[in-house]
Image: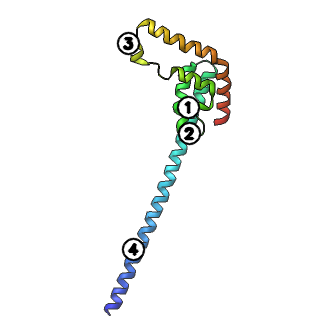
Amino acid sequence: MWTTILLIFGIAIIMAMGAYSLYLFAQLRKQKQLFEQAKQARITRIKESIEIIARAMQSNECNHSEGVIRLRMLLEPLGQKRLQDYPAMWALYEVVQDMPTHDERKALKKNERMKLDLARESKEVELEEKIKEEVLQLLKEIA
């Protein structure tokens, strides 16, 4: 009699543990799906931002220096392409990456700002056509 009771009790425990493990597997699957959806939504937002910036650079609504800084930050999380894969944009980025912005820029003397602006603008003019070609290439590649 005790053997039967213990056997029934053991089977009940095993069934409860099995049901709980099925519940945990279902929760894990649901969590993975939600994570994948969030990941895809983020990728979509990043691609949309890249497209907006690239089109703005193409139509001269956004200067190329600001564009390459923003594109570098957006391309890294995608992992597919890097700004280094676009030689003209990368060359401009290397010129402007360490230039002060915002309050740091305002704190500079006027002649220092003018010197930095001249270096930035001359590099933008030098690379403008190549950058526009690379922006078109980027737009095709992220589509």
Residue picked out by circle 3: 107
Residue situated in front as seen by the camera: 80 or 111: 111
Q: Which dot, 2 or 4, sits closer to the camera?
A: 2
In the rendered structure, the answer to whether residue 133 lies left or right of residue 25 reads: right
Quadrant assignment, res 105? top left
Q: Position of residue 71 (x, y in %)?
A: 55, 29
Residue picked out by circle 2: 78
Residue picked out by circle 4: 16
In the image, what residue occupies the spot 35% across and 82% down? 9
Task: Look at the numbered discs 1 and 3 and tell me whether their residues touch, using CB distance below 8 Å.
Answer: no
Please report whichever mark, 4 or 3, sits nearer to the chain's N-terminal start: 4
Q: Which mark is residue 49?
A: 1
Q: Position of residue 37 (x, y in %)?
A: 53, 48
- Amino acid type at circle 3 is Ala
Q: Which dot, 2 or 1, sits closer to the camera?
A: 2
Q: Which mark is residue 115?
A: none
Report helix, strand or loop for mark 1: helix
In the image, what residue occupies the spot 43% across and 63% down? 24
Please report whichever mark, 2 or 4, sits nearer to the chain's N-terminal start: 4
Q: Which dot, 1 or 3, sits closer to the camera?
A: 3
Quadrant assignment, res 49? top right
Give above or below for 104 relative to 20.
above
In the image, what residue occupies the spot 64% across and 22% down? 131
- Amino acid type at circle 2 is Leu
In the picture, the quarter occupied by the N terminus is: bottom left
Q: Position of residue 133 (x, y in %)?
A: 68, 24
Residue situated in front as seen by the camera: 58 or 80: 80
Mark 3 burial class by Cα count in 10 Å: few <14, some 14-19, many 20+: few
Mark 4 burial class by Cα count in 10 Å: few <14, some 14-19, many 20+: few
Report helix, strand or loop for mark 3: helix
In the rendered structure, the answer to whether residue 100 lies left or right of residue 133 reads: left
